[in-house]
Every structure is written in C-alpha cells, then in structure tokens.
Amino acid sequence: MNLLTQTKNTWCPGCTNFGILAAFKGAIEDLVKNNEIKTEEVVVGSGIGCHGKISDYLNLNSFCGLHGRIVPVLSGAKIANPNLKVIAFEGDGDAYAEGIEHLVHAAKRNIDLTLIVHDNQTFALTTGQFTPTSPKGFKGKSTPEGSPEEPFNPLFLMLSAGATFIARSYALEVKKTQEIIKEAIRHKGFSFIEIIQPCLSLNDTRDHYQKRIYWLNESRQKDNIDFAFEKIREWNDKVPLGIFYQINKKTYGDFN
Ligand SMILES: Cc1ncc(C[n+]2csc(CCOP(=O)(O)OP(=O)(O)O)c2C)c(N)n1
Ligand code: SF4
C-alpha cells in the first residue's frame, strides 16, 4: 500500500504540514492493517490553501473543493454513499473565515465526517493575511499595523454547536497526532481536530507553543462537557492538547 502520490511536493522545506501528512498516512495505514477501514472506501477532500495540497499528495480518492466549501461537498458524498469514510482538511482561513457556517451545521447535525484543520493562524498561501484565529496585534499583509480583533476559539464554537468529538493536536507531535486521527476516524459522528500548525515562512509560532503545550490525561472519561469547556477555555499561558470531548449520539441519516 503506497499512500503517497508521485506529485511534486511544493510545501516550503520543513513546513509543519509534512507532520500532518505523515500522521494522517500513518493513521490510514494502521486502520487498514487492522481491517477497520478499506482504502477504497476513504474519500479525502481539502479546501484552498497550502493545506489543500494534501489531496494531491495522498494516493486516495480525493477532491480539492472551493475555498471553505469542502464540508458540504463531503457531506453530500457521505449522504449519497453511507459506506464511505469521509475526511476533510481545511486551513484556519478556509474553515473559520470563508466556511465557518458549514462547520456549525455539520456539528449540529452530527454528520459522520472527520474534519482536520491545519491552524497556522494566517492565510498562508496568499502570503500572510490575518484569520479569525490570528492573535490580536497580528501584523500581516492586510493588517500592517496589527489586527485590532480578538481571535475566537474554534473548539468552544464546535462544542457549543454540538460536535460529538473534539480534539486539538500539534503538527510536530506526529505520533500523538496519528493516534488522535485514528480515534476521530473511528468515531461515528462529526469529529473535529484542530492541529496547531506553525507556518515556518510567515508565522513561526514554534517557540510560543513548545513552551505552553501539554497533553490531557487520555485515560479519563471524555463525556464531561463541563470539563471540556473548562479545558477548551485554557489558552494563553498553557495550551492543552488531546481529546477534550467525545460522546455517542445518533448521526445524520441514522434514523432508526
Ligand atoms: C472564495 C475565495 N476567496 C479567496 C480566495 C483566495 N485564497 C486562496 S488560498 C487563500 C488562503 C488560504 O488560507 P488558509 O485556509 O488558512 O490555508 P493555508 O494556506 O494557511 O494552509 C485565499 C484567501 C479563494 N481562492 N477563494
Ligand atoms: S507558506 Fe507556511 S504553511 Fe505554506 S508551505 Fe510554506 S511553511 Fe507551509
């Protein structure tokens, strides 16, 4: 099984998207080896941006959609053929600016779809404008004097909207990211993974996060919504990673 295509990779040397690609490839290999999924039933799709090139690099059924619109496209694929495992990749601009409304409805209806967001806190492909998760004061092409806006917390929004699986990882923690992706794909319902993905060329946040990240205890019960809200709100001095919340609930189309 070779999950990588021959397509020339045009990410910058050392781009942390390579970590996400390796983690995802490892997750699919493990699940296939374990007979949990079949490669022919996997459909991946991505939006527009540096992250979006991942569809070109994966030797799986794939589709590159319009900016911010991959969630409704893959929702359609899932509704048409419920046997598919549908996995969407988006950037933070893609997911939280252009496509934010689609995330809210996908979470609300608990469609059986996995969404992986490469959050580098900037529109990277278009060379560094601010996005909804850029910190206040972020200096970029569209905010040379610093963004006056407070960032918003996507995990908080997803929990409020009804997502049944919510996790955060860090692109340079490849093995842990691989395990979280496996759990998200196994989960029946809408699974949301935010991956902190420092952009080495335009927004190198590695120092900031490496000092702050820590992992939640994975062996605890994950259905406590109060605990999830409390941990999701922790962000400035310490940045928790791992699975914050997971519950079983009927999925969209699961009417029996
Ligand atoms: C509707 C629409 N608006 C704007 C663009 C221009 N555009 C292409 S890529 C991009 C930025 C992508 O940023 P993000 O989603 O954060 O992904 P990254 O490049 O950081 O991985 C933008 C604004 C577009 N292609 N379509
Ligand atoms: S601009 Fe940033 S996100 Fe895009 S390929 Fe280069 S390092 Fe990666």
Image (cartoon, rainbow, N blue to C red):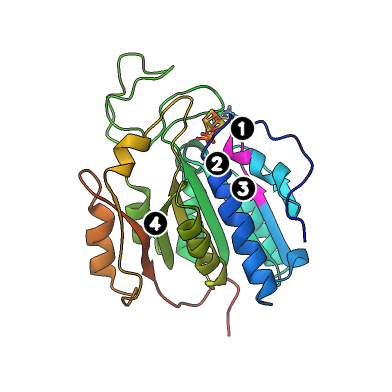
Q: Quadrant of residue 80?
A: bottom right
Left or right, residue 155 beside residue 150: right
Q: Badge 3: how crowded within 10 Å, few (<14), some, or many (20+)?
A: many
Residue furthest out toward the bottom: 256
Q: What is the CA distance from the residue labelled 3 to the residue labelled 4? A: 17 Å
Q: Earlier in the sequence, mark 4 or mark 2?
A: 2
Query: Do the residues under discs 4 and 2 have CB atoms within 8 angstroms?
Result: no
Q: CB under 8 Å between callouts 3 and 1?
A: no
- Magenta span covers which residues? 45-52
Q: Which residue type carries mark 3?
A: Ile
Outermost residue toward the top in this view: 144
Q: Are marks 1 and 4 in contact (CB under 8 Å)?
A: no
**Ligand 2 image-quadrant field:** top right
* Residue drawn at 59 percent across, 55 percent down: 24
First in sequence: mark 1 or mark 4? 1
- Residue type at numbered disc 1: Trp
Q: Which residue position holds label 2? A: 17
The answer to whether residue 111 is visible is no
